[in-house]
Amino acid sequence: MQFTEEELQEQIGKLEGWRLDKDKLVRKYMFNEYMKGIAFVDEVAAISEAFDHHPHITIDYKTVVLRLTADVEKLDLRQAREFNEAFEKNR
């Protein structure tokens, strides 16, 4: 389902830390230890496999950036919520 620009901004506003960058949904996660970030990426991979929708992942020491591309849909928003839950468990 496609959102109008207004609906999309409203939905993204409900997702802690996420922002829209052109056609990508983006969030930067910061960790206090490198291995916690790696454990988080492992969970992101498992979540992504379950959704059959895979983000672009950038790991820069204690920082992990996730980018969900293409037109943002309900699936992306649900997946972003699950990534946030995984972050809370791994931080």
Image (cartoon, rainbow, N blue to C red):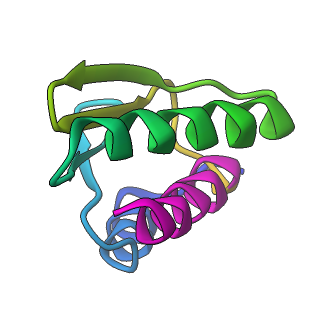
Count of residue discs: 0
x 41%, y 33%: residue: 38
Q: Is residue 32 above or below residue 14?
A: above
Question: Magenta segment: does it hold 68?
Answer: no
> Closest to the observer: 22 or 29?
29
Tell me where residue 4 appears, x and y as whole percent: 46, 58
> Closest to the observer: 77 or 59?
59
Horizontal side, residue 75 vs residue 84: left or right: right
Q: Is residue 54 above or below residue 72?
A: above
x 29%, y 58%: residue: 18
Tell me where residue 60 appears, x and y as whole percent: 15, 22
Tell me where residue 40 appears, x and y as whole percent: 47, 44
> Closest to the observer: 7 or 87?
87
Q: Which residues are magenta?
A: 75-91
x 31%, y 75%: residue: 13
Question: Main structural element of the magenta stretch: helix, strand or loop?
Answer: helix
Horizontal side, residue 12 vs residue 73: left or right: left
Location of the C terminus by quadrant is bottom left
- Residue 16, quarter of the rendered image: bottom left
Question: Magenta segment: does it hold 80?
Answer: yes
Horizontal side, residue 79 vs residue 18: left or right: right
Tell me where residue 79 appears, x and y as whole percent: 63, 52
Q: Is residue 63 above or below residue 89?
A: above
x 24%, y 36%: residue: 34
